[in-house]
């Protein structure tokens, strides 16, 4: 069950039924990457348990960004310790490039951890 929930999290599926997507549009539509469904089309669970719920997702996004910066910095150091300008350029460029992904996964992870929505195997098809 945990493996199935992790797979659903990585795919951005509903935490209760693991069927429908949390977001209305695919990530490839960058102009609408942040549009999230209000509720699951399959099981009708609301994706925003309370008003302002996703403000806490900023902390998850911050943690993801710190992990990205730490990983990139360590990799660059091990590959030859470039100048500070190179460090900053790589970190800024990669942070901008992964911003839509970071936004989505910070919300998905926050909903799975703190949304109070549990997986119900009876709703899976």
Image (tube, grey):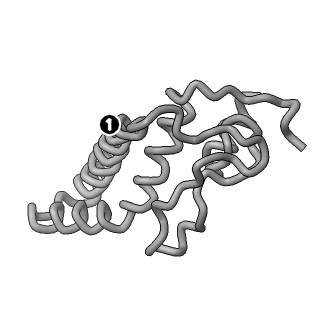
Please tell me which residue lies in front, 26 or 82.
26
Left or right: residue 61 versus residue 24 is left
Question: How far from the left and from the top, in percent, is residue 87?
Answer: 17, 61
Question: How far from the left and from the top, in percent, is residue 63?
Answer: 33, 39
Using a 10 Å C-alpha cutoff, classify the residue at mark 1 as few (fewer than 14 neighbours), some (14 to 19) or many (20 or more): few
Left or right: residue 28 versus residue 19 is left
Identified at 31% across, 64% down, the residue is 94
Question: How far from the left and from the top, in percent, is residue 125?
Answer: 90, 44
Q: From what the image shows, is residue 43 above or below residue 29?
A: above
How many marks overall?
Answer: 1
In the image as oriented, which residue stretches furthest toward the front?
51
Please tell me which residue lies in front, 117 or 103.
117
Q: From what the image shows, is residue 13 above or below residue 99?
A: above
Identified at 18% across, 68% down, the residue is 89
Identified at 69% across, 43% down, the residue is 7
Q: From what the image shows, is residue 27 above or below residue 67?
A: below
Question: How far from the left and from the top, in percent, is residue 22?
Answer: 61, 51
Identified at 36% across, 68% down, the residue is 97
Q: Secondary structure at mark 1?
A: helix
Q: Which residue is mark 1?
A: 59
In the image as oriented, which residue stretches furthest toward the left?
84
Please tell me which residue lies in front, 71 or 100.
100
Quadrant containing the N terminus is top right
Left or right: residue 47 versus residue 73 is right
Left or right: residue 97 versus residue 115 is left
Please tell me which residue lies in front, 92 or 39.
39
């Amino acid at each position: 069950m945990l493996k199935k929930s992790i797979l659903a999290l990585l795919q951005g599926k509903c935490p209760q039924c693991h069927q429908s997507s949390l977001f209305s549009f695919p990530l490839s539509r960058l102009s609408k990457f942040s549009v999230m469904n209000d509720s699951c089309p399959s099981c009708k669970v609301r994706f925003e348990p309370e008003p302002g719920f996703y403000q806490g997702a900023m902390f998850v996004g911050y943690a993801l960004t710190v992990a990205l910066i730490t990983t990139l910095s360590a990799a660059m150091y091990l590959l030859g310790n470039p100048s500070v300008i190179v460090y900053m350029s790589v970190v800024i460029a990669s942070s901008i490039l992964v911003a839509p992904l970071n936004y989505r996964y910070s919300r998905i992870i926050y909903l799975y951890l703190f949304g109070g929505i549990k997986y119900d195997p009876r709703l899976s098809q």
